[in-house]
Image (cartoon, rainbow, N blue to C red):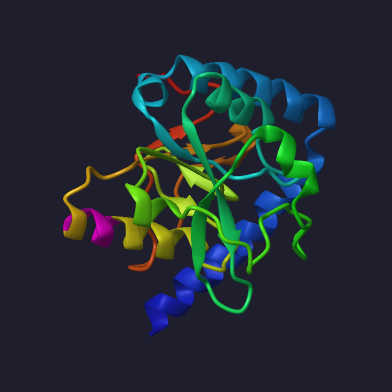
Amino acid sequence: MAAAAAVSGAKRSLRAELKQRLRALSAEERLRQSRLLTQKVIAHSQYQKSERISIFLSMQDEVETEEIIKDIFQQGKTCFIPRYQFRSNHMDMVKLASPEEIPSLPKTSWNIHQPGEGEVREEALSTGGLDLIFVPGLGFDKQGNRLGRGRGYYDAYLKRCAQHQQEQQHTKPYTMALAFKEQICLQVPVDEQDVQVDEVLYEDASVS
């Protein structure tokens, strides 16, 4: 128990520090790094070979994903976005019809657009799984450990993907975090609930 409390406390203080770092980033610098990461993504072999892609709609303190979303459609790939259930840590990835529909989707309490809970949409895991998942977060280390916002949506979803993959014999989705270089930490504190990502993409990262 003491160890769990220590990890929890370490996460809390690191979250506060990272939020402060992100607040200090100018809009111009966020845009500069976002554009650079968009280019890295489009040139990435994992992105190029993926057909079914899940991507988050970015909040103000996250890498801007709008141009990547446009490219997914231009390349004829299938795009899925998160639909969070706020009463639990359950999240589905549901199909986006076009980049143009994003502004018309309802907004959540986090100010993110997502399809309404009652709206029927194709759900990724029940229609063939995913090839690539772009993962948001507050902080990452170079080993792929991730510090989220504390709700556990992505950790739970990635576990479901792994379980689904075993049941359906699908290949495991590749997971890629998009980060400002200010979000890279020496070591992110983790517990057994936390799921690592395959790759953290940031300005100075080498790309496969």
| Left or right: where 146 falls relative to 150 | left
Residue drawn at point x = 41 percent, y = 49 percent: 145
Measuring from the top left, give residue 17's x and y in whole percent.
67, 54
Q: Quadrant of residue 164?
A: bottom left
Is residue 64 at all visible to an observer of this figure?
no
Q: Nearer the viewer, residue 126 or 173?
A: 126
How many tags in the picture?
0
**In-image side of 166 versus 52 (left or right):** left
Q: Which residues are magenta?
A: 162-166
Examine the rendered structure and indicate whether residue 87 appears above or below residue 53. below
Residue at the image position 46 percent from the left and 69 percent from the top: 7
Decide if residue 69 is on the left or right side of residue 141.
right
Residue 26 position within the rendered picture, expressed as x and y whole percent measured from the top left: 83, 32
Residue 71 within the magenta-colored segment of the rendering = no
Residue occupying the point 37% across, 43% down: 130
Q: Is residue 11 above or below residue 3?
A: above
Q: Give the quadrant of residue 58.
A: top right
The answer to which of 76 and 88 lies nearer the viewer is 76
The image quadrant of residue 167 is bottom left
Q: Main secondary structure of the magenta part?
A: helix
Q: Position of residue 37 (x, y in %)?
A: 58, 23
Q: Nearer the viewer, residue 30 or 126?
A: 126
Nearer to me, 4 or 120: 120
Residue 128: percent from left, percent from top: 32, 47
- Residue at the bottom extreme? 1
Q: Is residue 201 left or right of residue 68?
A: left
Q: Quadrant of the N terminus?
A: bottom left
Q: In what quadrant of the picture does the C terminus appear?
A: top left
